[in-house]
Amino acid sequence: MTEPIHLFAPYFRTEEVLEEIRECLDRGWTGLGFKTVEIEREWCSYTGLQHAHFLNSASAGLHLAMRLLKDQDGWQDGDEVVTTPLTFVSTNHPILYECLQPVFADVDEYLCLDPLSVAERISPRTRAVVFVGLGGSTGRLREVADLCRQKGLRLILDAAHMAGTRLDDQHVGGQADITVFSFHAVKNVPTADSGMICCRDVDLDRVVRQWTWLGIDKDTYSRSHEDKAYRWLYGVPNVGFKYHGNSIMAAMAKVGLRYLDEDNGVRRRFAQLYENAFAGRTGIEVIPMPAGCESSRHLFQVEVDRRDEVMVELNRRKIYPGVHYRSNQDYPMYRNLPGPCPRALAASQRVISLPMHLRMSEADVQRVATALVQIVEG
């Protein structure tokens, strides 16, 4: 019987994960604490970034980025943030949370922000740009970062797909004021759900840590481990959120990080097999990767005509790809916002994300590729 091939399938090294979690249970500390401290240090060591704070989700990190930059820089309600419509809504909802105005810029051939379109959308009220590394691609991140520096704008990097992505041999994140990574179950560092926020500035990192624990100026773990005595007194200078990560998720992330480069190597091998299968084929446009980008390959994307019909036929063959993404401009809260984006709209009607995960075999990749070629070429 033909087995189904799904877009994503979480993959865990169960015994190693359980060993890490068992330490949390044995020590009686499952919340914010020793494991979250460990994964933050290990993430900084791996990426070369100076600051990292473990969170309960990447969505929380994107909200924190918007909230704290607004607070620190004195942005006003109605100030503008240039962003992409071709992303998960968790990228753009935080702009609305903070009563800011999303302004959509178009995407390029990498399906990332086009710096020329970004430049066109900048106004006197623009305060920041959000760059999404779709599928693990760096797109034209360098150019967008240069533009932000020239214009005095903050840059937020939505790196949910970019764990392990390198640009010019350096892990991404150094280009932005704040970078947010996702460790959701189907991401390249899998947990149940968690994330990491990385601030360029040490003072912003300090403030982030307060805001993730309800605005309290010192978390319970820190207060419990100073001089081996519990310090009960704390201040609450801000109305913060409960966005911090916990040690169970950190334990899972530690194992995923341990194998991240190896696992991304498998993903890149699968991507190369897809590319070889589609080379010279008509009707299947592979979304390219830019020069200098060693991608995490969280996604492998193609564009085809009659996308929805192609998806139905793939499903009939028990192949279940995805779409990343439907243009946010299709949703009511973004429909009437400024920023015509014809390239993003066209991509949202043609793009397919093919199955890409560690439970696949090379034979599975070939099966998906062969089916797509047969369907598209008739």
Image (cartoon, rainbow, N blue to C red):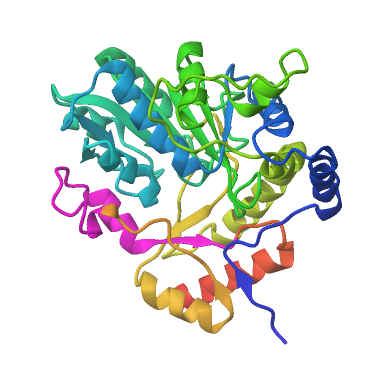
Residue 253 place in picture, x, y as percent: 69, 41
Horizontal and vertical percent for residue 50? 59, 16
Residue 121 visible in rendering: yes
**Closer-to-camera residue (134/213):** 213
Judged left or right of residue 335, residue 359 is right
- The residue sitting at 33% across, 17% down in the picture is 72
Q: Residue at x 46, y 36 (%)?
A: 61
Q: Nearer the viewer, residue 293 or 158?
A: 158
Magenta range: 329-355
Place of residue 303 in the rendered image (x, y in percent of width and height, measured from the top left) = 41, 60
Q: Quadrant of residue 162?
A: top right
Query: In the depicted view, which residue is nearer to us: 288 or 322?
Result: 322
**Quadrant placement of the N terminus:** bottom right
Q: Is residue 335 left or right of residue 200?
A: left
Q: Does 321 sit left or right of 113 as displayed? A: right
**Residue furthest toward the front?**
232
Residue 75 in the image: above or below residue 308 = above
Vertical relation: 269 (above or below) 365? above
